[in-house]
Amino acid sequence: MGRRSVQLRLWAFVLLGVCTGFLATRTAWGQGGEPRTFAIRGAKVVPVSSAPLENATVVVSHGIITAVGTNVPIPADAWVIDGKGLTVYPGLIDGFTDVGVAAASSPAPAGDAGARQQPAISRGPEDRPATTPWRSAADEVNPGDPRVETWRLAGFTTVIAAPKGGMFPGQAAVLDLGGERAGDLVVKAPVAVPVSLQAPGGFRSFPGSVMGGIAYVRQVWLDTNWDIQANAVYEKNRRGVERPKYDRSDAALATALGKHAVVLLPANTSLQIRRALRLAEEWKLNAVLYGAQMGYEVAPEIAAKKMPVLVDLKWPEAEKDSDPEATPSLRTLRFRDRAPSSPAALSKAGVKFAFYSGGITAPKDLLPAVKKSIDAGLSPEAALRALTLSPAEIFGVADTLGSIENGKIANLVLADGDLFDKKTKVKIVFVDGRKYEVREVLRPTEPPKGDLTGKWKLSFATPQGQEEATADLSMQSDGTLTGSVASDRGTGSVFSGWVSGEKFSFTINIAIEGSSGDVVFTGTFEGTSMKGSIQAMGYTFEFSGTKPTRMAAVQAGGVE
Amino acid sequence: MKLRATILCFAAAFLLTAPGVLNANEKGTSGAAMDASAPVILIRNATILTVSHGTIDKGDILIKDGKIAAVGDTLKAPADAVVIDATGQFVSPGIIDCHSHIAVDGSVNEGSVSVSSMVNIADVLNSDDIAIYRDLAGGVTTANVLHGSANSIGGQTVVIKLRWGQPAANLPFEGALPGIKFALGENPKRSNFRVNGAPERYPATRMGVEETIRGAFTEARDYKKSWDDYDKRVAAGEKNAIPPRRNLKLDPLVEVLEGKRYVHAHCYREDEILMLLRVAKEFGFHVQTLQHVLEGYKVADEIAAAGTGASTFSDWWAYKVEAYDAIPYNAALMTRRGVLVSINSDDAAEATHLNQEAAKSIRYGGLTHDEALKMVTLNPAIQLGIEKRVGSIDIGKDADLAIYNHDPLSAYAIVQKTLIDGRVYFDREKELAARPALEKEKKDLLQKAKKKQDEEKKAAEKKPEEKKTEEKKPGEKKPEDKKSEEKKPEEKPIPPQGDAGLGGAR
């Protein structure tokens, strides 16, 4: 086979990839060709549920862990991954977040499109302010949430995700961070009903105070229980009895609690934690506290109530650019100093706890935040458990998640060292038995000269002739590129891209013979023209591109 | 002379409350766990202001199990007793503040509705509020913590002991009847301010305030009837009766009707005072106290006839139209007409010198020494229904005491020790001694934080490229930053903002 024919063949794949790149990264499933059986051989395995194994093998087949051990046969059809130098952990779990859940859509009121939107005024609990417990994370999964990928690349294969906003935002679900369609991500739903006591209303709208928030939530639980009780009586004997009025919130809460969803109560300071412990008891809730950063003061009290907690990993710190003259109180200073020691205190007291991302928005900050609690006395084993098996237990999915055991969902993290070591890098992540390789993100070195944002017409000569594609790019001020590459036959999304000076690079990932490969566009740009090369599988092709001005676009018969 | 004394007394009060200078919620100088049994204490050789039965010169007080076990001359103490030598000092019953807003987490007002009786101050007691310690340093041992006055019928209220260092659940005064705040006049009708973005709230007149209270109690009466009917049906053996829906707004009003909850009504003008007494009579409930009640002297006979207490300011007036007719003789005049009167603070700082506020009614109106001291001890105790436990130095009562270096009605009086349940919760000497260590701890923590910050900055400067891009990976867009902040569960208590002028709610 001559070089030309190799090129031809490769080009066919590249073009296929360019055209169906989107499908390649997101929807190659079900098209056949993708391996479904893997064997990670010769790795250190940390199952969490049992002692670590050296030089062990993990076999994954069709989304399930089918074998773990130092002496297990490798199936003939398995893709073998050399685990030398790698440590295999269970996929990490973010105990409470909205990663993977679409933001609420709030349609503007008719005829009032320009006006600033104010939430409706509530005049009491009966108006059900900021209450949408019927919303379900499972029904609002957004696989396109970019954080699904960034969280996954950081080793988080699973999240307990809930809709966001309000006092009863909606029901949380366990989501695996990989999948083609929304439904693919859902592991279990509902698993939790988060509650906020943060009253949104002020003097404007009920509730407007912390005590108002508590009173409101108390009334909602009373109403929910009344709903259950009254309907039970009514259904037995309807004739001649005034019917209990239907209430959407009560009905949704009754259903969720009936399915054993836990209730998440906010409690960060010791004041809030003690209060939440009391309220959970008064309200007879199967509750889990979230926040818990002052746990170092009250861990034994939490343990006495056998209350599980979720610890917010966004440790309190001095506000950026705060008044340098203003001195925080000693209590605040102590809190900032000691908050990371809470997990150790909780662990020592025997509290079941898990970590959650909380205020952390960059996934790279998650494990360093855990490391801080290790530095403050938490054992690495307990830290790992709080990222894996403990959240699985708290949310009732430990039968399928949280450890490396035969029969569990194949969520794995392969790292080149100890997970909590600063230098360690996550190399491969398995979600539901699908392999995701973690690539180094290419970084710009200088500020962009110009803006690459816009629709670019790309043309390139392939051995098969002249081809065209459109790159719809969006550049952020720091040079980060996102967007997609499209041709007549389909669209592919950019997973990594940057602009540095007048140079740029963006990469899409495509499937070639059941495996995946990157197609990298690199080059330079000036004004409305760009030129450069396309690299794939070690081969390089030239391309050029132009960004039609609006006028040109209109003359050409018009996009938009 | 008087002015100079006042200045001195304020200076003294400032020194006394100097923990504020430290601005730290440090505790533990004297806070002890409730479960450990209280020590036996003998206060020796003090001038004892019993309030109930005169003054004992050079007397002793024996405290056992948190109670006053004996009062008299040269008492014998058990060998293990802690002896407090109070030679030359004055012991008074702990000060009781009948109108306080300390120790509340978040706003003291649920200001969104005209009837906010569903909210309860007891739910949001904040044991970390430094005002507890400052008031303790002013001799206050008990406070009636009230909801604000933004509503005709406000939230449920709670009487607390200032047990600094104990968790919030241990603050409520055991067995004290809970209360509810009412408010009449300008604050509930909101004639003086508007909330941005909110439609105007009913009521807007004093007539409307009356109608709102009337409406709420009519509703409460119907609600009570629905429960009574239900109980009857169940008692008659009916199995398919659907119970009424619990209504947290009406439950406390039913308790008021049943005499299980005190009404503390914020009021100023004579007409609105009479209005409330009429409405209460009509619905058959009792108004336990009128708060502020600055025109009370005009209708003292009617207040006395209703058996209603009056809790007022010493000499605070003219800060708004409805306070124009206030006079400093109010407390004395009402007392002389047979009204049970207390003097309150409505303010954390004012509470630190309630003893001096009480003293003013000697100057204005000629009350006796004990009558004046009763205004901040026994009288508020009676008004709050806790006089069997506190308010005077009598055998069997709680050992809630304030030890002063001078007569508490003197401008020179400074609290040396404050005891609650026979425990020293404030000790001026220990407080002063503890400060250097706390100052040092604070300095060290600040330095540690700064060092860490500098290190992080240095690390960031070392590899600016990495830092720059890592800060913003694709997918971490601005809106998400905002999102996660909202999720942070109540990290900071919300300061009572937006209700300035209404929070303290005079």
Image (cartoon, coloured by chain):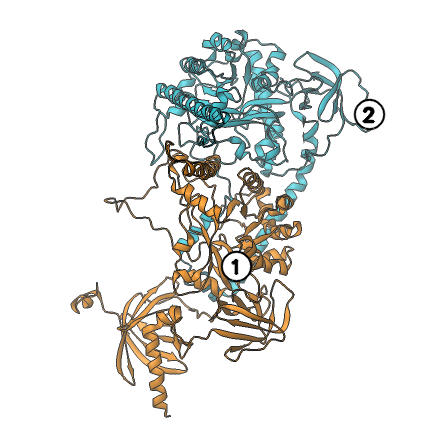
Chain colours: A orange, B cyan
Chain designation of label 2: B
Q: Disc 1 and disc 2: Cα gap in Å?
A: 61 Å
Work out whether disc 1 and disc 2 sit on a shared chain: no
Q: Is residue B27 left or right of residue A143?
A: right
The three-letter amino acid code for the residue at tag 2 is Pro
- The label shown at residue B78 is 2
| Spot occupied by residue B370 in the image (x, y as percentages of width and height) | 63, 12
Q: Is residue B90 above or below residue A279?
A: above
Q: State the SS at label 1.
A: strand
Residue at the extreme right: B79
Q: Quadrant of the N terminus of chain B?
A: top right
For label 1, the residue is A93
Residue A502 visible, this angle: no
The three-letter amino acid code for the residue at tag 1 is Ile
Q: State the SS at label 2.
A: loop
**Residue B434 found in image quarter:** top right
Residue plotted at (36% across, 65% down): A482
Q: Label 1 neighbourhood size at 10 Å, few (<14), some (14-19), many (20+)?
A: many
Q: Is residue B147 above or below residue A41?
A: above
Q: Is residue B64 above or below residue B298?
A: below
